[in-house]
Amino acid sequence: MRRRDAATTDAGRLDDFSYLEPGTVYLDAACQSLRPRPVIDALTEYYTEYNACGGRVKYAWGKRVDEEVAAARSAVLDLFSLSPRNHAVSFTLNTSYGLNLLLHQLPMNTYLRVVTSHIEHNSVFLPTMTAASRLGVERLVLDRDADGALRYEPAQLERAVVVVNVTSNVDGRQLTNLSQLVHDTHARGGIVILDAAQTAAHHHPLLRKTEADAICFSAHKMYGASLGVIVARHELLASLEVTFIGGGMVADVREDSFDLLPDDPAALLEPGLQAWGEIIALRRAIDWLSTVRPGGRSPAEHISGLADRLYDGLSGIPGLVLLNTVSAPVISLYSPKQDAHRLAVFLSHSGIMARSGYFCAHHYLKEQLGLPPLLRFSLGLHSTPADIDLALDTLTRLMKGLA
């Protein structure tokens, strides 16, 4: 696929985000990224040119939908360098929904424990509680090192269901011992399910050729429309005790029984009508990420440069305490003397959108660390150096004015 150096507006923003009004500074991409024009165009094209259902449809519109959806599944596997011989791609609502679909259909009397970590989004932290309860096994919550590695003893992985994030939504730290964790878990009869919601957009190389059993992520955090994605090994899907079921999953139905679709592992997690337009738009988002070259650099290089600029600037503002120890596309902080929600409101008055609160990581931030609500800045490919400079200048003036 041919890479292209992306055109920019006079403000230095990628042309694909030129619909943003001047002075708009959106720094909440960890919640959901803004969508580039090609993704918006793909949605519009679907709704105006071939707005049909896919799946065993005989007319031309439906056949085109099937082709586009198949291409989207292939694009996801290509993104992670995984093979359709071993993996299936299913589409759902979001990361949380995908994790629940997997965890709450795991077979009974198979696993000894559910393992997770303290630094988890509620999408992981809460379903691991209810899954352990349903399975009747213990739940083990482990620490993560400063570099993001999961701290564990091999015996703790015995027949374990390990569910952890690959990239933190609080401070961007990454699961640096992913390969070793998967190896050690499989060696003891367990499985690994990954929350890749903060990884798929800019850090997907971390997951290339991974041996993990499932990857869950959200398209709307990687420049696509609102959609959840599950990439799962065929062996894991075949082991599920499927109870969440509906149309699109079955080959035949009788009064008291049914037959699931043969040779279609992805369908096991896709009950009911699918979000066809959103799935098609995901393929466009992946294509865009694979080809766009902001300033002649890769998306990861572009984001890394912006993250360094933001981290260095925030580190120099008196009265702020950063949770990050290194730069990352996600940076969280607090002020011992100022309420984070108040700071977010004042920033909003200047056109700067940043998130405040606990970012769905209540246990880690509030219970374990005992912190007040935080302020979080998160970057996307729509971000510019001017955005960061304006946010830093505004926050500096706010901290001085509120002192």
Image (cartoon, helix red, strand yellow):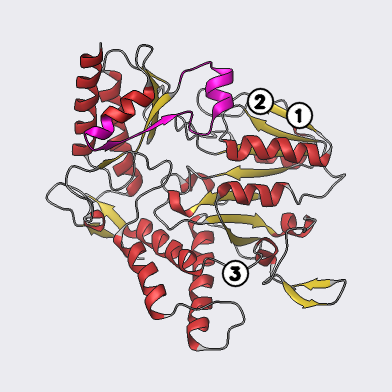
The image's mark for residue 6 is none
The question of residue 352 being in magenta is answered with yes
Alpha-carbon neighbours of circle 2 within 10 Å: few (<14), some, or many (≥20)? some
In what element is the residue under mark 1? helix
- For marks 3 and 2, give the one nearer the viewer: 3
State the residue position of label 1.
156
Image location of residue 136, percent across then percent down = 84, 37
User: Which amino acid lies under the numbered mark 1 shown in the image of this protein?
Assistant: Gln
Give 283 or 305, whichever is nearer the viewer.
283
Please state the horizontal and vertical placement of residue 324, each as a whole percent of the image.
41, 24
Residue that appears at 52% across and 23% down: 365
Residue 222 lies within the magenta run:
no
Q: What type is the residue that disc 2 sits on?
A: Leu
Up the image or down, 25 lies above or below 231; here it is above
- What residue does disc 2 label? 142
Residue 90 falls left or right of residue 258: left
Residue numbers of the magenta segment? 347-372
Residue denoted by label 3 = 273
Q: Is residue 13 left or right of residue 84?
A: left
